[in-house]
Amino acid sequence: MNNFRYHAYTDIRFGKGQVKCLTELVAPYGKNVLMVYGGGSIKKNGLYQQVKELLSDFNVYELPGVEPNPKIESVRTGVALCKDKNIDVVLAVGGGSTIDAAKVIAGGATYDGDPWDLVTDNKKIGKVLPIVTILTLAATGSEMNKNAVISNMETNEKLGTSSHDFIPQASICDPEYLYSLPAVQTAAGTADIMSHIFEQYFQKETGAYITDRYSESVLKTCIKYCPIALKEPDNYEARANLMWASTQALNSILSCGKGGAWTCHPIEHELSAYYDITHGVGLAIVTPRWMRYILSDATVDRFCEYGKNVWDITAEDKYECANMAIDATEKFFKDCGIPMTLTEIGIDDSKIDIMAEDTIKYNAMDRAYVALDKEDVKKILMACL
Ligand code: NZQ
Ligand code: ZN
């Protein structure tokens, strides 16, 4: 098992009605609040009104309209508001995109240059304003992690940045907010949760037994509860388990003792950078193709272990077992209603070369579970068409 740092930092308030804690969570940081949110889902489901009432004694300024795959322009607007209104605390109300934008806004508030610098070079991140979140989508884990992913469509760049100070001070996670999610977001969010686990589980280090068993149990949770949430959107047990799975999948507990670079996320980020697609959909399409591409004598035991422990596969032959596990993964995403080819989401082969090149340019693919070069990424993307 590798050395690791695990610092549980975020004050999580999980469960029905936890929004009642909002005032208590925001108050220690000051009166001037920047409320960041997306395209309007929180107005439709009543959360916006609730937040405004709870914060009626605060000076609440608003940044609405943060896009899925949040754009740097929204971040710039938020930073300008922070500087102009002397903001004390940034409150993100929404999914991963809103929370990620809030993080870079909170960092940009004390930075003199263009906040895009903080995305391309995280060493430039200095003081970060306190961040509180109200999560409305189970997917990214941004509510309890140090990452933010921002897109610059002018340059076709979707890049991740991170800082320990981006970890939210507190996050309210009420599974009832997930009831209003469109089915595709429930499914894509689950694919994202599972992909976060795969990125950490399929790594060279094999001695982190406890972490691997924990990962398998979070994967099983997704497989059990996503179909239930899709059938019964207001099934509390399903939503609650998915919501906690999303937080656990990427709050660094599932990388304790592990290491190495990620694979499917870097490839998906290029798909989003060029085509602005839903993150989890891209991951669901890429993942089974990547799994098949890297299946070899060096990886077959790991895939078979995954098949046995997650899918209860009993095949004796290890290649048969591994292939059955990969097929089960693909079928699961398909059965959740995710389009499973790039063609279905309007992507052809015209930009595969540049996307493969950028995947290698921006990521340490040589340190991945199985090292990939540009030609490998091209072949995986071609298999996704
Ligand atoms: O904008 P609104 O109107 O709120 O609608 C959103 C949006 O259209 C909607 N939605 C969210 N909660 C809802 C809801 N609709 C109805 N009811 C609700 N309760 O869902 C749509 C997608 O929202 P978004 O925030 O974009 O989704 P998600 O949470 O999947 O975030 C995706 C972004 O996070 C990045 C992705 O790359 C992408 O940019 N990631 C962030 C990570 C992190 N910070 O650690 C890691 C991930 O791997 C990922 O890269
Ligand atoms: Zn992700």
Image (spheres, rainbow, N blue to C red):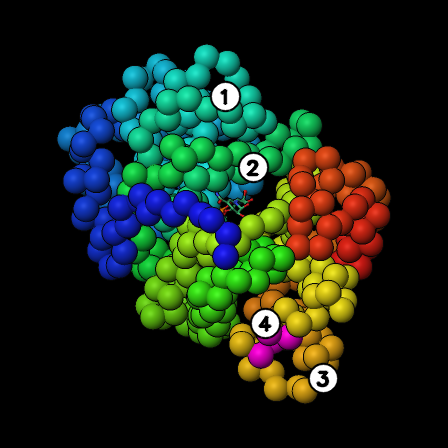
Distance Cα–Cα, label 3 vs label 1:
51 Å
Q: Which mark is residue 317?
A: 3
Q: Would residue 154 appear left or right of 2 to someone viewing this image?
A: right
User: Which of the two residues, 7 or 333, is positioned nearer the viewer here?
Assistant: 7
Where residue 221 appears, as percent x and y from the top left, is: 44, 70
For the residue labelled by badge 2, is the local secondary structure a helix, a strand or a loop? Answer: strand
What type is the residue that disc 4 sits on? Tyr
For the residue labelled by badge 1, is the local secondary structure a helix, a strand or a loop? Answer: helix
Indicate which disc, 4 or 1, sits on the residue closer to the N terminus.
Answer: 1
Instruction: Name the residue carrying label 2.
Output: 160
Q: Answer few, some or many: residues within 10 Å of disc 4's Cα (few below 14, many 20 plus, some between 14 and 19).
A: many
CB of mark 4 near ligand 2 (< 8 Å): no
Magenta span: 304-308
What type is the residue that disc 3 sits on? Asp
Q: Answer few, some or many: residues within 10 Å of disc 1's Cα (few below 14, many 20 plus, some between 14 and 19).
A: some
Instruction: Name the residue carrying label 4.
Output: 306
Mark closer to the observer (3, 1): 3
